[in-house]
Amino acid sequence: MPKDASGPPRSLLVLGGTSAIGLATARRLIARGARLVHLAGRPSPALEKAAGELTALGAEVRTVPFDALDPESHQASLGPVFAAGDVDLVLLAFGIAGDQARDESRPLDAVRVAQTNYTGAVGAGLLCGAALQEQGHGTLVVLSSAAGVRARRADFIYGSSKAGLDAFAQGLGDALYGTGVRVMVVRPGTVLDPGTPRGDARLTTTPGQVAAAIELGLRRGSETVWVPGGLRLVMSAVRGLPRPLFRRLVV
C-alpha cells in the first residue's frame, strides 16, 4: 500500500473489528479512498460478517485474531500486520461498558471492564504507537469517552477506566510528538443506536456521527475531538462542579 502521510488514509487497522463506531469509520474512509482494512478482534461470525460488508464496498479486508484481555498475544497478532506494509491509521475502538449494578457486587467483572478498557488498550496502544513510529508516519485514533472526564455514581467503573485511557492516550500523543505520528483522542457522549430516541442532543450521539467527527478531525489534524462538539462546554462545566453539588445534580 503506497505511503501517503498527508492525504486520506489508504490502509486501516481497526482494533475492535465488530465495533459499531469502528465499522462506521471504516465505511467513511473506504468512501474516501481507503483500500486495505485490517479488522482485529476475536474470531466470530460477527467479525466475518463485518469483513464481508466492507469487502462489498470495494476494500481488501483482512481479519486479525486479537484479544484485548490477552496482552501477551498482542505482538504475535499485530506484528504481522505492520510487517506486511505501512498502516496509515490505527483506530483503537474496543471496549466494554459493563453493568454498574452487577459489577459493584462482582469485583471480578469490574476488573474485566478495567482490563479491557485500560490495560488492554495500554498494551495495544504502545505496540501500535511504536510500529507507526518505526514506519515514520501514521495516526492512532483512540476512542475515549466523555464519561472519563468525571465519573458519575451511575457508571464510575466504566468512567474510571476511560479516564485512565484518556490520560494514557494524551501522554502517548506527547511522547510521539515530532516523530511523524500523531494521536487523536475522541470523546463521545452517550452513543445510541441510530433508531434510538436521542434525548438531550448535547450529550448523545450515534456511531455514524462519531465516524463523521473522526473523519473531520483527521482532515483538520485535531488532537482532541468531542462528539457532539457542544459537549466540550458541558463537560467543562461539569468538571468544575463542587462534589456535594455534583452528587445532587448528576446520577
Image (cartoon, grey):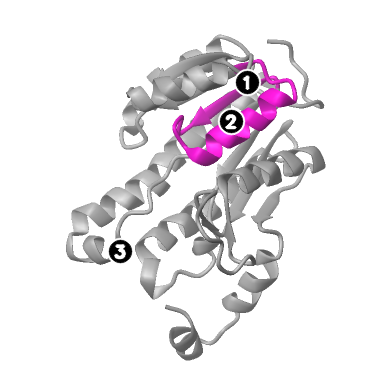
The residue wearing badge 3 is: 100
Which quarter of the rendering shows the C terminus? bottom left
Q: Position of residue 209 (x, y in %)?
A: 64, 48
Q: Check residue 87 in the rendering and tell me which mark sits there, or answer none.
A: 1
Q: Is mark 2 on a helix, strand or loop?
A: strand
Amino acid of disc 1: Val
Mark in front: 3 vs 2: 3
Amino acid of disc 2: Val
Is there any visible trace of residue 186 in the rendered image?
yes
The answer to whether 202 appears left or right of 5 in the picture is left
Q: What element carries label 1?
A: loop
Find the distance from the CA under tag 2 to the CA under tag 1: 7 Å
- Mark 1 and mark 3 lie on one chain; the one further toward the N terminus is 1
Identified at 51% across, 37% down, the residue is 125
Q: Where is residue 120 in the image (x, y as percent from the top left)?
A: 39, 40
Is there any visible trace of residue 75 in the rendered image?
no
Find the distance from the CA under tag 1 to the CA under tag 3: 36 Å
Mark in front: 1 vs 3: 3
Amino acid of disc 3: Gln
> Which stretch is magenta?
10-36
The residue wearing badge 2 is: 90
Q: Check residue 23 in the rendering and tell me which mark sits there, or answer none.
A: none
Which quarter of the rendering shows the N terminus? top right
Find the distance from the CA under tag 3 to the CA under tag 2: 29 Å
